[in-house]
Each structure stands twice: as C-alpha cells, then as structure tokens.
Image (cartoon, rainbow, N blue to C red):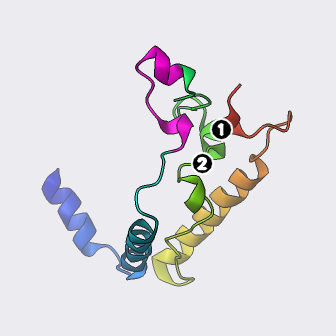
Amino acid sequence: MLAQATTYLAASPKSNRSYLAINRALEDARRTGSLDVPLHLRNAPTRLMQELGYGKGYVYAHDDMVGAQRLGYLPQELANRRYYEPLDVGAEAQLKKNLAALAEAARRRTTSSDGKSPADGP
C-alpha cells in the first residue's frame, strides 16, 4: 500500500503552489504566534470545559457535511486567510473549480435561517 501511494505521488502533476501556501502559513504562524483554537473545536472532557463553551456548536462532518462546512476552523485573527491558490492550468484548474464551489457553498451557509453563526451553537 505504501509503495502504491509513493508511486502515485511520484507520478502526479507537481506545482509549487502548495510550497508557497505552506510558506504563507508558516509566516502567519511566526507573525501571530500561538493563537487560540476556536472554542467549538476544543475538546471538552470536563464539566468546567463544557461550561466554558468548549466544543459547543461543533458539527461532525460525517454526520452533517453541510453543517461542518459552515464552521470556522482557523483562529479568528486568520479567519479569512487563504493559503493555497491554485492556477488555472493543468490539474490545478480542476482543484480551483472544486475549491471555488466549496467556498460558494460555505458562503451560502454562513448564516442559518435564525441569523446565528454556526459556531454560536444551538
């Protein structure tokens, strides 16, 4: 299995866009330091953590893909950052279309019918 994955990756089209993306992410990490993980992504194994709102509003993607797409996964300070910017050529053109469709779906679902952000919880 590992040999098959290695062969697949070796034969796949390459681009430096991922390299540029990781460098932008690393620069943000150096610039901003350690930022808080959004509360809805934090594990809440104790009553105190639950009372503090840890895990509130979390949506498990395998149970509700639409709900999970509405969640924010970056710290608030980086909420609108995009790191990977595919080109309009080769295999990246399809990736760009896929990412644009996901972004559009997320924009349409950003606010629920009651006006609450998904991260606000029930």
Q: Which mark is residue 9?
A: none
Q: Compare residues 89 and 71 and report the one nearer the observer.
A: 71
- The residue singled out by tag 2 in the image is 72
**45 left or right of 54?**
left
> Percent from the top left, x then y, of residue 9?
26, 67
Q: Indicate the amino acid at tag 2.
A: Gly
Q: Is residue 86 above or below residue 121?
A: below
Secondary structure found at label 1 = helix
- The residue singled out by tag 1 in the image is 119
> Percent from the top left, x then y, of residue 118?
69, 37
**6 left or right of 92?**
left
Q: Is residue 19 above or below residue 58?
A: below
Q: Residue at x 68, y 29 (%)?
A: 121
The quadrant holding residue 81 is bottom right
The quadrant holding residue 63 is top right
Query: In the rendered view of the protein, which quadrant contains the C terminus?
Result: top right
2 and 1 marks in contact (CB < 8 Å):
yes
Q: Residue at x 52, y 77 (%)?
A: 86
**37 left or right of 4?**
right
Q: Residue furthest right?
A: 114
Does residue 49 belong to the magenta stretch? yes
Does residue 10 belong to the magenta stretch? no
How far apart are the alpha carbons under marks 2 and 1? 7 Å
Q: Indicate the amino acid at tag 1.
A: Ala
Which residues are the magenta region?
Answer: 38-50
Q: Residue at x 62, y 45 (%)?
A: 69
Question: Is residue 31 visible in this depiction of the protein?
Answer: yes
